[in-house]
Image (tube, grey):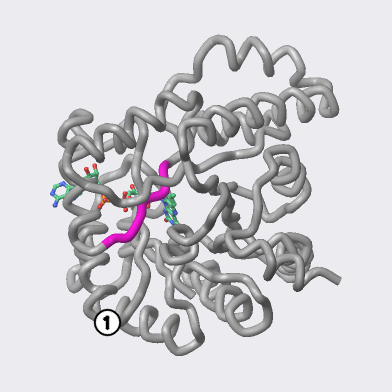
């Protein structure tokens, strides 16, 4: 099943979930417990990120294949151009198709070790995500997603240039874009407006991090590449030493953000799970999010 078809035919706001490849056996057991806990809710899709090194990449490839064969979930694999020749990329993409993964998030990736270090393409590889989108399209009937940055990609000179290349990447054959983390609904909505003003009608989906711990807040600040608003720090920082209170207020902040996005017609929320399911299940319940095919999800429940 193609992600974009599920999203376009969903009659109600829906959600998706993102995991990362497990580091060891214990991690893998936690990942699979979370996957099984989320499966009955039938998210629009579930994705696994793609790391820079061999064992982590192998973890993505093995686990996304298992999702395709052993679960009812719709899998989407992330793939980056880092340290891959075109022929290696072709192999990975071919493998995804062979195991039943027909949705790919096409990314350039960051230089390993230093996000802002100098980007060096593999001598027989690709330079930009746009080229990876074309390669995936050439190789089969995949549904392709790309990344987008509400505050602009950290390497982009300005928002205009950033939007220009984002729209080129979408036109190269992407069906939708997932936005990097942001703090206020307006930050995402302005990105959506920029893309639409530039003439693209591709679906724009917001990335959402459930703020359950100070670590998730720091990660959000780091990934967004922006300065957090004062109101957010004033609401959460005083609770840093009180895990229960932080979690409760963090989930309130995220619920308010999601409600505002849904009120603006956003069709789908993409949750970063940190390989745990509880906070996502709580938010899905609070926000009344559904499977894109509600009857199927109910039928699948024990
Ligand atoms: P690109 O779209 O190639 O853009 C990179 C920069 O080059 C931008 O500044 C862009 O404006 C510019 N640019 C693009 N095309 C051109 C051109 N033709 N000429 C000149 N300049 C151009 N990283 C991982 O390693 N693994 C993951 O699984 C992963 N998942 C992610 C998921 C999401 C939703 C997001 C938002 C990010 C994810 N990342 C992941 C991080 C991502 O790989 C990095 O942010 C990376 O720096 C940019 O990748 P990109 O695909 O956006 O690059």
In the image, 122 versus 249, the foreground residue is: 249
Q: Position of residue 154 (x, y in %)?
A: 31, 35
Say which residue appears at 39% left-offset and 54% top-offset.
112
Q: Is residue 249 left or right of residue 82?
A: right
Q: Is residue 170 left or right of residue 35?
A: left
Q: Position of residue 13 (x, y in %)?
A: 56, 47
Q: For the view shown, which residue lies furthest in the bottom direction?
A: 98
How dense is the environment of label 1, judged by Cα within 10 Å: few (below 14), some, or many (20 and up)?
Answer: few
Taking the magenta stretch, the answer to whether it contains residue 176 is yes
* Above/below status of 102 relative to 235: below
Say which residue appears at 50% left-offset and 15% top-offset.
229
Q: Secondary structure at mark 1?
A: helix
Q: Which residues are magenta?
A: 174-179
Question: Residue beneath label 1, please?
Answer: 139
Say which residue appears at 19% left-offset and 57% top-offset.
171
Taking the magenta stretch, the answer to whether it contains residue 48 is no
Say which residue appears at 63% left-offset and 30% top-offset.
254
Q: Is residue 267 left or right of residue 256?
A: left
Q: Main secondary structure of the magenta part?
A: strand
Which quadrant does the C terminus fall into? bottom right
The quadrant where residue 258 appears: top right
Instruction: Kindly tell me whether mark 1's CB lies below 8 Å from ligand 1.
Output: no
Q: Position of residue 297 (x, y in %)?
A: 71, 66
Examine the rendering and report whether any part of residue 110 can be seen: no
The quadrant where residue 37 appears: bottom right
In the image, 197 versus 16, the foreground residue is: 197
Q: Position of residue 242 (x, y in %)?
A: 83, 22
* Above/below status of 246 relative to 87: above
* Above/below status of 219 relative to 268: above
């Amino acid at each position: 099943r193609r992600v974009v078809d599920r999203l376009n035919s969903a009659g109600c706001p829906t959600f998706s979930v993102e995991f990362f490849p497990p580091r060891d056996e214990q991690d893998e057991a936690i990942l699979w417990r979370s996957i099984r806990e989320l499966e009955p809710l039938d998210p629009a899709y579930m994705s696994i990120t793609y790391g820079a090194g061999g064992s982590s990449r192998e973890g993505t490839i093995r686990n996304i294949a298992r999702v395709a064969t052993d679960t009812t979930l719709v899998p989407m694999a992330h793939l980056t151009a880092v340290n891959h020749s075109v022929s290696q990329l072709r192999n990975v993409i071919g493998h995804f198709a062979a195991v039943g993964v027909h949705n790919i998030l096409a990314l350039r990736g960051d230089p390993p070790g230093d996000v802002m270090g100098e980007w060096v393409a593999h001598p027989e590889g690709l330079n930009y995500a746009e080229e990876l989108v074309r390669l995936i399209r050439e190789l089969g009937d995949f549904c392709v997603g790309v990344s987008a940055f509400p505050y602009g990609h950290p390497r982009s000179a300005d928002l205009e240039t950033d939007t220009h290349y984002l729209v080129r990447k979408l036109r190269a054959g992407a069906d939708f874009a997932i936005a990097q983390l942001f703090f206020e609904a307006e930050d995402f909505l302005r990105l959506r407006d920029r893309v639409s003003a530039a003439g693209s009608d591709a679906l724009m989906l917001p990335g959402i991090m459930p703020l359950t711990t100070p670590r998730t807040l720091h990660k959000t600040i780091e990934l967004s590449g922006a300065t957090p608003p004062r109101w957010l720090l004033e609401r959460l920082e005083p609770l840093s030493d009180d895990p229960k209170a932080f979690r409760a207020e963090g989930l309130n902040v995220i619920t308010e953000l999601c409600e505002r996005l849904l009120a603006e017609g956003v069709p789908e929320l993409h949750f970063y799970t940190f390989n745990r399911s509880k906070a996502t299940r709580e938010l899905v319940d609070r926000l009344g999010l559904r499977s894109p095919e509600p009857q199927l999800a109910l039928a699948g429940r024990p």
